[in-house]
Image (cartoon, grey):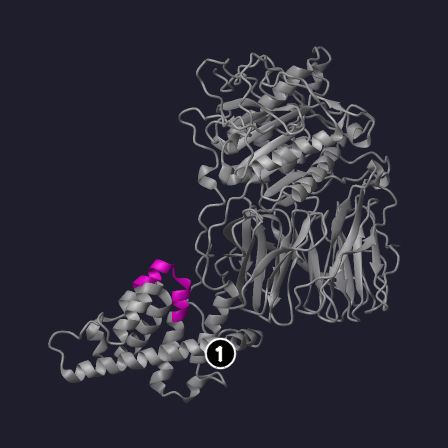
């Protein structure tokens, strides 16, 4: 067919095998641990179509995917199809890991410099002869070059520096070449080659004699030089071992005396796994409006992506603009099909550049007892669409019993399907609340995601009207996904770890634009395709090839100008201890995962999951007065009744400084009285310790004000206090200035406001306007230069800005500065000389020193990056990739600073 969208499929006996009857991409990969689906139903079912619409206050979308039943047979892909994800398996042979952590590499380099630098007071090199001092400096320089060079170049340099017999007969140059040969051969060669070179240097069978005609004296001199070189190499190695920690501690006292002449581009280290993404939304187009550009980034990078649509998005069944809607005849199945056609066109264009690229549409049974349609993009079979096709509410906030909201609250026992006009699913079905959850668990079992994206389950209400700030299908659908991910994490053990990312919905239109013009244009282009602006019959469907309801305004309510994460925006999840060890805390599988590196060059361990489930995305760490680390976050519980849904602030404290053990989670409760009041819309907590050691936690509440609790001297906590403020959005941030005074800062839709202690130990002062211009939501704050420095992004640009706030004689702002960037969005982490955040394209962008050019790494990641200082001038930086794996790097503050190669921590993310 010219539209490229095959019909429901051939009748039995046509001789054409069905495609990916088991969730498309992972059709028969037992190595992925996925379940096998029944073969695609090959009856004569007629497809049905419907579509959703986007009206300023009313979102309508396609139905949700149900769980698929598993059967022993594997449907075969037609000839010419590439088995999806075969080239992107995560469970293959692990890539070689770096021999040293990034911090260890920096420490080793510093140790070599310390051992070789005659100007260092305690350096053994001070007792060396001038010739040895010269050789030591050259050795340190060569060591740095070898560290920066790719492995192959290291090997070639080692070969060149072995010098040959002529070099051995030289005097001063011969000494240096021999020493370099011994050292470089040991460092750069593979183990077997190291053994052979050691044998040659020891005069074994592999020894190469001096040049023909060389005198016996020259030969003896060459052997002597090599022996001395070997001793020097062994001594240098011993010095590294003995003084590694001391040298790294020395980073706190001085900048390395020497460094590479030119900073290399950011090294990538081990290639990150692509991860597997499942995103679950209520309606067709929620992903395009609220998850892009993350969706486009993942598709462009070739990551396996499965988008699941809970409802059919049938709305009122009219696929027409507002002006023509009154004269149009409602047809809900056809409108649902038109919306599906628009989604298929938008995804095909993002993946292949061709909106007409073919899809294979199949039907599969679900774990909830119904059926779902699975569409596989033929040209890019790692891209799947899963249509669960439940009824939608048809209204943003009105009481509609036949909806996800009504099913959640028990107003209806079962929610019926709404099948699109050309879907291969022909048998109608209905789901109970538990069957919806089980259907979603089956989807997760099938796709085994490492990143799960879904909408915000707690969007809040408008303070004046008390209406929801988001469509009820959006956030009740997200609550079903919350419950399903919790069940999947608890019940399915043979699976990879997964991280969660939540997205803000309708309220994006009331916030400053987060995307630069080019990113916004790309996002709008996908919506233009979905809205079927050209009215050409690309799909060959009578229902239409897109959603005409949104064609008058494909950008929605400025939704294509921005994207915002609902949670997980904090940048304080990586911290260091007094021994220069590192601790990282992120939420995986609904539990807080801990990674730990003891000391400056110790081996990493983790992820280890702290006991306790229900944790929301995002965790923050703070160091207490006694040196222990406390971890804060929020936790969601469902309760026995729908009204018992609850989000609360919780924390766990390290048993003792440096210990791996943490105590049980303790609850600080919530300032909200009931879920129905503000939909449990509290932010992640901002936590800080003031100069007296007093710990305090602050959240934005559902009424868009600031609330706080302060720990008392006896360890108890005071009540949740109202601290004022209005129109607060996102999560607040907190830090202490040079005098130990605590500041709390929060973004509004137009500026930034703040609170400050008049002195350590005192209550916060009144809310104060900073006079800063509007910013995008995530803020980052840290104590700097006697005050608190704030980092944020310029709306409509993505450029990073910074301003210093001081608390002398009230809260004041000093000289806001634009720091540039790579046109990204989201949180920025700042420690020492390092700035880092998401760049356009989704990768991590970083600046390693004021005025230095921003550089882009290949890492795509979940949530926000985090960084911390170790000593005075060493910064460690970390992200959690889309494969739910921790990646770390480091940078020493130097004129030519750069990031060390990224180091993945722990094994590849297979089954835990």
Dot 1 surroundings within 10 Å: few (below 14), some, or many (20 or more)?
Answer: few
Residue 239: in magenta span: no
Rendering quarter of residue 260: bottom left
Image location of residue 339, percent across then percent down: 62, 22
- Whether residue 171 is visible, yes or no, is no
For the residue labelled by badge 1, is the local secondary structure a helix, a strand or a loop?
Answer: helix
Residue 152: in magenta span: yes
- Whether residue 710 is visible, yes or no, is yes
Rendering quarter of residue 428: top right
Rendering quarter of residue 332: top right
Residue under the image location 50 percent in, 52 percent down: 857
Position of 47 with respect to 781 (left or right) is: left
Image location of residue 475, percent across then percent down: 74, 35
Image vertical order of residue 134 relative to residue 149, above or below: below
Q: Which of 562 and 358 is in front in this view?
A: 358
Q: Nearer the viewer, residue 525 or 827?
A: 827
Image location of residue 409, percent across then percent down: 82, 31
| Magenta part of the chain | 143-156
Q: Name the residue under label 1.
A: 242
């Amino acid at each position: 067919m010219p539209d490229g969208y095959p019909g429901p499929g051939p009748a039995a006996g046509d001789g054409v095998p069905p495609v990916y009857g088991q969730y498309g991409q992972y059709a028969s990969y037992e190595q992925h641990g996925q379940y096998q689906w029944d073969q695609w139903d090959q009856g004569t079912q007629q497809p049905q179509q419907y579509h959703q619409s986007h009206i300023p206050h009313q979102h309508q979308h396609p139905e949700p995917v149900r769980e698929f039943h598993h059967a022993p047979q594997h449907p075969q892909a037609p000839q010419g199809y590439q088995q999806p994800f075969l080239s992107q398996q995560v469970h293959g042979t692990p890539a070689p890991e770096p021999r040293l952590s990034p911090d260890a590499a920096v420490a080793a380099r510093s140790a070599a410099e310390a051992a070789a630098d005659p100007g260092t007071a305690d350096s053994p090199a001070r007792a060396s002869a001038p010739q040895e001092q010269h050789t030591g400096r050259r050795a340190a320089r060569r060591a740095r070059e070898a560290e920066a060079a790719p492995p192959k170049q290291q090997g070639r340099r080692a070969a060149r520096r072995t010098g040959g017999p002529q070099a051995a007969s030289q005097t001063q140059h011969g000494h240096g070449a021999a020493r370099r040969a011994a050292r470089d051969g040991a460092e750069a060669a593979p183990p077997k080659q190291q053994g052979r070179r050691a044998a040659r240097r020891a005069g074994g069978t592999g020894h190469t004699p001096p040049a023909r005609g060389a005198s016996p004296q020259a030969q003896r001199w060459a052997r002597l030089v090599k022996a001395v070189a070997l001793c020097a190499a062994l001594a240098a190695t011993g010095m590294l071992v003995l003084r590694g920690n001391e040298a790294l501690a020395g980073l706190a006292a001085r900048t390395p005396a020497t460094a590479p002449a030119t900073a290399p581009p950011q090294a990538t280290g081990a290639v990150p796994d692509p991860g597997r993404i499942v995103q679950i939304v209520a309606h067709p187009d929620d992903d395009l409006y609220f998850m892009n550009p993350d969706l486009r980034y993942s598709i462009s990078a070739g990551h396996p992506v499965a988008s699941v649509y809970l409802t059919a998005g049938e709305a009122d069944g009219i696929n027409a603009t507002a002006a023509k809607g009154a004269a149009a005849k409602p047809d809900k199945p056809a409108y649902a099909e038109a919306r599906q056609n628009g989604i298929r066109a938008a995804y095909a264009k993002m993946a292949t550049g061709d909106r007409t690229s073919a899809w294979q549409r199949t039907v599969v049974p679900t774990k909830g007892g119904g059926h779902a349609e699975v569409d596989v993009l033929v040209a890019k079979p790692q891209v799947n669409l899963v249509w669960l096709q439940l009824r939608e509410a048809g209204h943003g906030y009105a009481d509609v019993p036949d909806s996800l909201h009504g099913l959640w609250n028990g107003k209806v026992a079962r929610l019926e399907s709404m099948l699109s006009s050309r879907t291969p699913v022909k048998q109608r079905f209905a789901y109970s609340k538990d069957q919806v959850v089980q259907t979603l668990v089956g989807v997760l079992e099938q796709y085994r995601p490492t990143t799960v994206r879904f909408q915000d389950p707690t969007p809040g209400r408008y303070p004046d009207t008390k209406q929801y700030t988001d469509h009820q299908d959006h956030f009740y659908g997200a609550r079903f996904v919350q419950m399903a991910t919790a069940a999947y994490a608890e019940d399915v053990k043979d699976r990879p770890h997964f991280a969660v990312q939540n997205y803000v919905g309708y309220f994006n239109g009331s916030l400053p634009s987060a995307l630069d013009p080019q990113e916004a244009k790309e996002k709008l282009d996908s919506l233009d395709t979905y809205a079927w602006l050209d009215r050409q019959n690309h799909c060959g469907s009578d229902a239409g090839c897109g959603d005409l309801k949104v064609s008058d305004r494909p950008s929605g309510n400025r939704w294509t100008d921005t994207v915002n994460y609902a949670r997980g925006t904090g940048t304080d999840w990586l911290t260091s201890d007094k021994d220069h060890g590192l601790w990282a805390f992120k939420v995986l599988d609904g539990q807080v995962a801990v990674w730990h590196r003891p000391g400056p060059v110790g081996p990493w361990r983790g992820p280890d999951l702290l006991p306790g489930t229900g944790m929301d995305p995002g965790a923050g760490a703070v160091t207490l007065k006694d040196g222990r680390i406390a971890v804060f976050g929020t936790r969601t519980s469902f309760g026995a009744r729908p009204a018992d849904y609850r989000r609360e602030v919780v924390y766990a404290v390290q048993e003792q400084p440096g210990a791996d053990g943490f105590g049980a989670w303790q609850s600080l409760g919530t300032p909200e009285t009931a879920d129905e009041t503000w939909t449990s819309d509290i932010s992640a907590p901002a936590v800080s310790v003031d100069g007296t050691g007093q710990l305090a936690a602050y959240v934005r509440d559902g009424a868009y004000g600031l609330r706080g609790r302060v720990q008392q001297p006896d360890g108890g906590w005071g009540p949740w206090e109202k601290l004022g403020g209005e129109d607060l959005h996102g999560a607040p941030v907190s830090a202490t200035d040079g005098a130990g005074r605590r500041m709390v800062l929060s973004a509004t839709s137009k500026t930034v406001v703040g609170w400050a202690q008049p002195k350590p130990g005192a209550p916060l002062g009144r809310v104060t306007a900073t006079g800063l211009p509007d910013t995008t939501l995530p803020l980052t704050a840290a104590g700097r230069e006697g005050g608190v420095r704030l980092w944020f992004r310029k709306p409509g640009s993505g450029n990073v800005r910074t301003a210093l706030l001081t608390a002398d004689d009230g809260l004041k702002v000093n000289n806001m500065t634009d720091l540039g960037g790579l046109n990204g969005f989201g949180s920025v982490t700042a420690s020492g000389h390092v700035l880092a955040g998401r760049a356009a394209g989704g990768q991590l962008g970083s600046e390693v020193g004021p005025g230095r050019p921003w550089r882009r790494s290949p890492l795509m990641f979940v949530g926000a990056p985090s960084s911390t200082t170790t000593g005075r001038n060493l910064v460690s930086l970390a992200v959690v990739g889309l494969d739910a794996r921790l990646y770390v790097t480091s940078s020493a503050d130097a004129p030519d600073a750069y990031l060390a190669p990224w180091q993945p921590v722990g094994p590849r993310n297979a089954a835990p």
